[in-house]
Image (cartoon, helix red, strand yellow):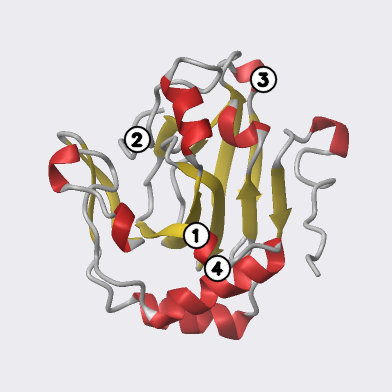
């Protein structure tokens, strides 16, 4: 059975929590975190790229075979690092169990290395993806959220991501809000898992609905 993810402590109370955002501070044990970091160390991480820009992050992408991108697409995830390694498959299975999903629902895994001082600008993930899950490793992260219809400081919320924590974005927070990461103060790693959105959601985004036309952008912009 799915364990309830914490919602009441993110922004001071449940009435302030954007709909669809969940957070669990101790999703992993310390031993699980250590094992993941040891398995990540030999991965062929590459500088993250968005079109002609390169970010400070180093990343590895693992796509379901039928959804592997073409390099000429020029997107942030336009390369693949090969088949999903067994240790990431095990993590995916753990996440799927927590969310009452099939492991096969996840079509993309991203491993990111954030060196000190690395930010991520405001964006929403690509419309081909549905639920977005993030697991933090080694260092703290500070994530910000703002409604796409009210992109100003007054409507911005923030969430401190503890090492070993899990966050989940779906529904309104996924489609109607943007998110970003403040510059990291220490070396940090994350694993991001994404499901497939399905044709109806992707078509709605592409047609200019409430969540139209901004891809995931790794460039260092505020």
Q: Can residue 150 be seen in this snapshot?
A: yes
Residue 19 found in image quarter: top right
Q: Secondary structure at mark 1?
A: strand
Q: Is residue 6 left or right of residue 215?
A: right
Picture coordinates of residue 23, whole percent (x, y): 71, 53
Q: Earlier in the sequence, mark 4 or mark 2?
A: 4
Closer to us: 189 or 147: 147
| Residue at image coords 52%, 32% | 200
Nearer to us of marks 3 and 1 is 1
Q: Secondary structure at mark 3?
A: helix
State yes or no: discs 2 and 3 in contact (Cβ < 8 Å).
no
Nearer to us of marks 4 and 3 is 4
Inter-mark Cα distance, 4 to 3? 35 Å
| Residue at image coords 55%, 61% | 135
Location of residue 130 with respect to 42 vertically, above or below: above
Closer to us: 189 or 126: 126
Location of residue 33 with respect to 210 vertically, above or below: below
Closer to us: 143 or 169: 169
Q: Is residue 141 left or right of residue 121?
A: right
Q: How many marks?
A: 4
Q: Which residue is mark 2?
A: 217
Residue 106: assigned label: 1
Residue 63 found in image quarter: bottom left
Inter-mark Cα distance, 2 to 3? 21 Å
Task: Find the residue positioned furthest to the front.
Answer: 199
Q: Which residue is mark 3?
A: 155
Residue 103: assigned label: 4
Picture coordinates of residue 4, whole percent (x, y): 82, 59
Query: How many other residues sit within 10 Å of disc 1, few (<14), some (14-19) or many (≥20)?
Result: many
Inter-mark Cα distance, 1 to 4? 6 Å
């Amino acid at each position: 059975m799915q364990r309830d993810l914490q919602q009441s402590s993110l922004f001071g109370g449940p009435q302030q929590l954007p709909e669809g955002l969940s957070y669990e501070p101790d999703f992993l044990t310390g031993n699980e975190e250590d094992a993941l970091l040891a398995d990540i160390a030999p991965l062929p991480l590459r500088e993250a790229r968005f079109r002609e820009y390169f970010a400070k992050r180093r990343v590895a992408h693992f796509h379901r075979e039928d959804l592997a991108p073409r390099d000429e697409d020029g997107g942030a995830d336009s390369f693949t690092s090969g088949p999903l390694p067994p240790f990431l498959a095990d993590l995916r299975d753990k996440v799927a169990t927590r969310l009452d999903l099939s492991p096969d629902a996840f079509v993309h895994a991203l491993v990111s290395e954030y060196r000190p001082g690395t930010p991520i600008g405001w964006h929403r993930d690509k419309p081909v993806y549905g639920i977005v899950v993030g697991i933090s490793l080694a260092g703290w992260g500070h994530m910000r959220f703002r409604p796409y219809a009210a992109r100003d400081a007054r409507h911005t919320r923030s969430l401190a991501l503890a090492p070993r924590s899990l966050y989940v974005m779906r529904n309104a927070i996924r489609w109607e809000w943007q998110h970003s990461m403040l510059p990291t103060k220490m070396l940090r790693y994350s694993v991001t898992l994404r499901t497939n959105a399905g044709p109806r959601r992707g078509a709605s985004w592409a047609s200019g609905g409430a969540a139209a036309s901004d891809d995931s952008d790794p460039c260092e912009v505020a």
